Amino acid sequence: MQIGTRRVACALLVGLTGAAATLGVRAAASQQSEIAEIQLQLANELFTEGRYPEALDAYQRAVNSASPDDIRRPRAGLIMSALRLAEFDLARTQAEAHVKASPRDAEAVALYADALWSSGLFEEAEVRYDEAVKIDPDLARGRHGVARALAARSKLPEAMEEAQAALRLAPRDLEIHHTIGTIFERMHNFEEAAASYSNYVNLLPNKDRSEKADWSRSEIKFLRSFGQRVPYELDPGAADQTYTIDFRLVNEKVIVRAKVNEGSFQDFVVDTGAENTILSGPTAQRLGVTAITYTLSAGVGDVGLRGLQLARINTLELGPLKLHNVPCMIKDPPLRNLPVKESESLSPLALGFSMIIDYKTQKITFGKKLAPEPYDFKLPLRMHRLAMVRGLVDGTQPANFVVDTGGEVISISQAVASSLNRPASSRRIALQVFGSSGWDKDAFLMPGVSLAFDTIEYNNFPVVVLNLNTPSALLGFRLGGIVGHKFLSRYRVAIDLENSVLGLKQIAKG
């Protein structure tokens, strides 16, 4: 009897111990959940105030503390904060986990598409935006993504329709206002663009001092300075014509003659890697082009972000074409210790024209529409502030490449180079590279790289590795690289904005 009693007591003791352990686990889990919720509330408050670095840290702590059932909200906040801070890798990694856990959640799919877009994977992002809208046609972020994708394919009326639909669904989403501003600007409706950018700035948190915010404030002032003037105004009938002019090659640069403000004709570099017509300070002063405001620019070089002046050219003549009220940038203040003089440059793309550049005949043809002609290769083209095509590096890493007639070599970004997982002992040859933002002291030559642009292949090829982090952050997506003269000069090159195609016809040797 005593033995039996002891057994019951032992059994009771074991049962009570187990219950206590269970209660302890539940208490710990409850406490962890409370910690995650507190961190989430803090992160949301910081994000609302525009304190994105602190918000990112708080969201990360909330993710680390959250249970699998409660991780969705802090992870979404973490992704959005990472996107605001140009932490593209973090955003994409977290977004992949986010959509994997909720593959049929429209918001998760759209957020993953945003992360893909920021990584420069535009085609993959477009597929996911379409998927999100099919799941939920009333999802504002999905419709906004579709609008952005349409604009990159230069389908501006359709893009505006989608963006306005997104805005009706989420009228206080500041990113939608910004996208509408960019579409209006590309359509040359400057007053409407300024109004949209103003809405964007007004919705920003007071503590937001980001480069994108500063850029938008300058852009508003600049766009409104046009008043009743028609930007890029053409003479009647001029938009229906195509124009052909001669060029010459100087140090692998395409040089044309153009006239500003009824001055004399002078040399301009044709630079499709630039968003605006560019004048040096002395040239602008000599031709009476006065600054309206300052803006931020970023390019290759250790200066990173560079302050430049925004101005307006009264008339720009390029061969038989004459445009009025042309936006431009003035490189003032100039960079110091230049190896070469900063030159004037222009891009038919920035003026709103498609173009053909024939390196054999040394002629450029441009117009709103290009006559169809056969090409050996047709690569999908995306115009998102810059014209870009997709390439594949070492057979594994997709990346977007800027089509840059002002560039000389084929380059990849440091971010793409580091993703190739090459051993630390891989050969690197230090280079001196000077870009639009000064010297890139970290540049180097990486031999033995494989590149593919559709069926165009470069095997065991040396590429220049550049630091493109600052221009990527300013643009809002990762630049994968640049294709310049070494790539383009083998072809008759058509940059067809209307059909979103880079057409390449090989030049016969001899």
Image (tube, rainbow, N blue to C red):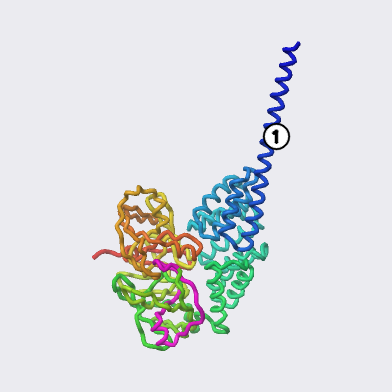
Relative to 12, does residue 313 appear above or below in the rendering?
below
Q: Is 309 covered by the magenta stretch?
A: no
* Res 282 quadrant in image: bottom left
Residue 464 spot, x, y in % from top left = 34, 60
Say which residue appears at 56% left-offset and 59% top-offset. 53
**Which residue corresponds to the image point at 54% horizontal and 68% vertical from the top-left?**
212
Residues in magenta?
276-304
Give percent across and percent down for residue 394.
Answer: 37, 51
* Location of the C terminus (image quadrant): bottom left
Three-letter residue code for mark 1: Leu
What residue did someone put label 1 on? 23
Can the viewer see residue 405? Answer: no
Estimate how packed mark 1 is, as few (under 14), some (14 to 19) or many (20 or more) residues with alpha carbons within 10 Å: few
Q: Quadrant of the N terminus?
A: top right
Q: Nearer the viewer, residue 375 or 431?
A: 431
Secondary structure of the residue carrying tag 1 is: helix
Do we see residue 296 in this rendering?
A: yes
For image coordinates 73% across by 22% down, the residue present is 12
Above or below, 158 relative to 457? below
